[in-house]
Image: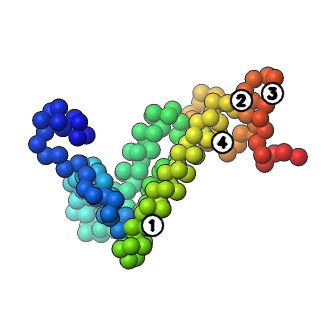
């Protein structure tokens, strides 16, 4: 974003704050992408608080996380050409839960928990999406219907066959 702002001579370059020092997940969400946070706050959160949920801030927060996680999952589904709702669960459910939990912890514990989430969460997310991608490429019997697009293949694929000469069997199906 900084490169685009420089080319367009955009004066306000406050795209992120020092998110690495945050001690709560809510602080991280507010500071890692200021542009997206401002848009979600203005057009989703404030409208939910004022018009939809009538001053119920926790429900408005859930609505913001739901909109954001559905949008992120939609972008991944379009780019990867399959729907695998791991990011939806991790961001929409675990992120929301972590936001309320880290608010009650101390500053150091919250920061350590945030960095653990980055280390374990992002690695797990990448591993699961790669596993689903390669299962869809190498498992036989994948069609082009909407059900095949929505149902995870990596959960049901018993063996990956690359060519007629040899096959790889899943470890849980060995005798």
Residue at left offset 81%, top offset 45%: 173
Identity of the residue drawn at 79% across and 22% down: 164
Name which of mark 3 and mark 2 comes first in the sequence: 2
Q: Does the residue at mark 1 contact the one at mark 3 (Cβ under 8 Å)?
A: no
Secondary element under disc 4, as helix, strand or loop, is loop
Q: Which residue is mark 1?
A: 113
**Distance (Cα) linking label 2 and label 4:** 12 Å
Most distant residue in the top direction: 164
The x and y percentages for residue 151 are 61, 41
Q: Residue at x 32, y 63 (%)?
A: 21
Residue 86 at what x, y percent from top left? 53, 49
Which of the labelled discs sits on residue 154, or is there none? 4
Q: CA distance from mark 3 to mark 2?
A: 14 Å
Circle 3 — which element? strand
Q: Which residue is mark 3?
A: 166
The residue that mark 2 highlights is 140
Name the residue located 45 percent from the left edge and 56 percent from the top edge: 118
Say whether disc 4 or disc 1 marks the residue closer to the N-terminus: 1
């Amino acid at each position: 974003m900084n490169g685009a702002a420089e080319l367009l001579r955009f004066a306000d370059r406050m795209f992120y704050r020092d998110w690495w020092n945050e001690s709560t997940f809510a602080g991280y969400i507010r500071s890692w992408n200021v542009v997206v946070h401002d848009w979600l706050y203005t057009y989703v959160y404030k409208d939910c608080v004022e018009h939809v949920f009538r001053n119920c801030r926790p429900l408005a927060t859930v609505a913001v996380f739901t909109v954001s996680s559905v949008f992120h999952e939609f972008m991944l589904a379009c780019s990867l050409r399959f729907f695998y709702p791991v990011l939806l669960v991790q961001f929409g459910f675990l992120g929301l839960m972590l936001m309320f939990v880290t608010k009650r912890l101390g500053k150091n514990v919250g920061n350590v928990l945030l960095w653990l989430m980055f280390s374990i969460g992002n690695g797990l997310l990448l591993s699961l999406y790669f596993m689903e991608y390669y299962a869809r490429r190498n498992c036989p019997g994948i069609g082009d219907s909407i059900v095949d697009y929505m149902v995870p293949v990596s959960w049901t694929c018993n063996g990956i066959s690359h060519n007629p000469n040899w096959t790889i069997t899943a470890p849980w199906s060995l005798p």
